[in-house]
Amino acid sequence: YCPAQNLYIDGAGFTAAWEKVLSPMLPRQRPGVTVLRDYHAENIMLLGSLHKQGLLDFQDALVGHPAYDLASLLRDARRDPTPELVQPLIDRYIRASGSDPAEMTRAVAVYGAQRNLRILGIFARLCQLQGKPQYVGMIPRVWRHLSTDLSHPELKMLQDIVLAALPDPTQDFLTR
């Protein structure tokens, strides 16, 4: 519950929804791959060509699902990849990795939703508790990415909980 905004989320229902969504994905996380919690275009450096790249801000690296970094790039808080680009990139990843198309599409939606809910919380905290309002301007984009991912049919229960608890990021709401 957030008294300042009169927001309440059913913690038990929220946890149960995430457990239902994430539990089928756990086998793909073992042994897993390296994923970066702060993976976005600004943290990728070109080292002379597209074939040589370096990464910044990798101190939060974890072992996770192969779709996490792909979801991070496609649902970036700082930019909107065109819809014409998103699906071909997912398809290319599927072909290159030999992944099951339905499983990878679901995984991108799940990890995109998980990541962007986390980012919304971080941006709210940075604004409200640390006096950094510059992140508020990115909330509508993150919300659109979250909405896209929550529209996946297997995320319906989670979508209902999130939409019931979090208001649309209208200009009036964001100003308050």
Image: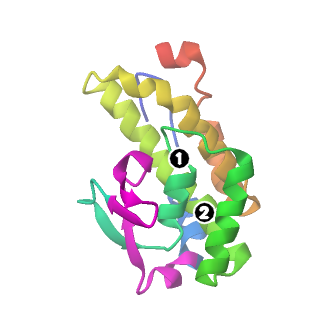
Label 2 neighbour load within 10 Å: few <14, some 14-19, many 20+:
many
**Location of residue 102 by image quarter:** bottom right
SS category of the residue bearing label 1: loop
Q: How far is the residue under mark 1 from the one under mark 2?
A: 25 Å
Q: Nearer the viewer, residue 11 or 76?
A: 76
Position above or below: 55 against 78: below
Residue stretch rendered in magenta on the structure: 25-54
Position above or below: 143 against 106: above
Label 1 neighbour load within 10 Å: few <14, some 14-19, many 20+:
few
Cβ atoms under marks 1 and 2 closer than 8 Å: no
Q: Of tags 1 and 2, which is closer to the observer?
A: 2
Q: Position of residue 91 (x, y in %)?
A: 70, 69
**Tally of marks:** 2
Q: Position of residue 53 (x, y in %)?
A: 37, 62
**At x 68% / y 44%, what residue is drawn?**
82
**At x 30% / y 65%, what residue is drawn?**
61
Q: Nearer the viewer, residue 51 or 112?
A: 51
The answer to whether residue 120 is visible is yes
Left or right of 52? Residue 92 is right
- Residue beneath disc 1: 10
The answer to whether residue 14 is visible is no
**At x 61% / y 79%, what residue is drawn?**
96
Q: Amino acid at mark 1?
A: Asp
Question: Can you say which quadrant of the picture contains the N terminus?
Answer: top left
- Residue beneath disc 2: 108
